[in-house]
Amino acid sequence: MSEQVKPYNENDEKRTQVETMFNKIAPFYDFLNRLLTLGIDRKWRKKAILKLKADDPKNILDVATGTGDLAITADKLLNVENITGVDISDEMLIIGREKLDKKNLSNHITFINGDSENLPFEDETFDAAIVAFGVRNFQNLEIGLAEMRRVMKTGGKMVILEFTKPTFIPFKIGFNLYFKYILPTIGRLTSKDPKAYKYLYESVQAFPDYDKFVSHMNNVGLKNNEWEKLSMGICAVYTGTK
């Protein structure tokens, strides 16, 4: 397992610190996502969701749903009947529910407070499980992955979108400068939380990506595990089946 990076200090458990961080930055989260990625995050989510197109899932679990962008993208691109989003941050969920109300999606997308490592669902409940930029925040990566696998039906697909470290050297240098210095400065001035976007950089650096992440998927019993690099390695989409 990789080094565990926490947003604020070494004493409190990571889960509690992540919840505190997202509750603090929730009002600025969507704006900063668009600004700091130049809007490319929308394309990444579409790319990830389209991995499920051929499977035609009807009942989807969105883990670490945040303000609901991935769930809403799934509803737009797939012929789903129900999407359940789970997140530990009440403030993020409040904003997500406001989005659902504005888009008249509350009848088949539901957001609940829940821990990704102790999901409040029976075994074999969902046709698919998705998560965008959330597994990096799990307190224990393999427990979270195993929980997602547990609540999926046999044959169901898991799709994970997560930041990665670029490998092409010139691009890697520019990426690191942006993520380490420019992004935290913008985030600090906008969200008023000096630690949140410093944590983003540090957590990406420490997180296992590409084949290393796939090895964790293998460890929890997922099969046919693959990854695809997006935007020259800024992020990757991982897929596996139960």
Image: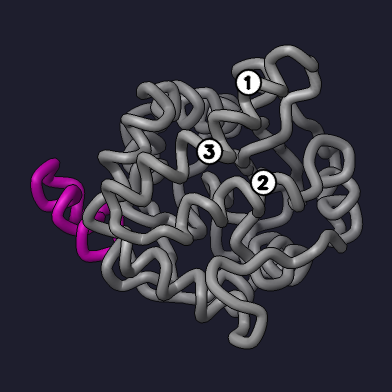
219 left or right of 200 in image: right
N-terminal-most mark, 1 or 2 = 1
Q: Secondary structure at mark 1?
A: helix
Q: Residue at x 32, y 30 (%)?
A: 35
Depth check, front residue: 30 or 202: 202
Q: Label 1, label 2: how many angstroms apart (C-alpha)?
A: 15 Å
Look at the image and say whether residue 100 sits in the magenta stretch: yes
Q: Secondary structure at mark 3?
A: helix
Look at the image and say whether residue 99 sits in the magenta stretch: yes
Residue 166: which quarter of the image?
A: top right
N-terminal-most mark, 1 or 3 = 1
Work out which residue is located at the far bottom of the displayed protein and give it.
11
Residue to which mark 3 is pinned: 181
139 left or right of 22 in image: right
Report if residue 121 is visible in the image: no
Q: Residue at x 76, y 52 (%)?
A: 206
Residue 175 x, y percent position in the rendering: 62, 25
Residue to which mark 2 is pinned: 204
Please report the bounds of the magenta region as a residue range.
93-110
Q: Label 2, label 3: how many angstroms apart (C-alpha)?
A: 14 Å
Q: Disc 2, disc 3: CB below 8 Å?
A: no
Q: Label 1, label 3: how many angstroms apart (C-alpha)?
A: 11 Å
Residue 33: which quarter of the image?
A: top left
Eye-nearest disc, 2 or 3 = 3
Residue to which mark 1 is pinned: 174
Residue type at mark 2 is Val
Residue type at mark 3 is Tyr
Residue 23 x, y percent position in the rendering: 33, 69
Q: Main secondary structure of the magenta part?
A: helix
220 left or right of 100 in image: right
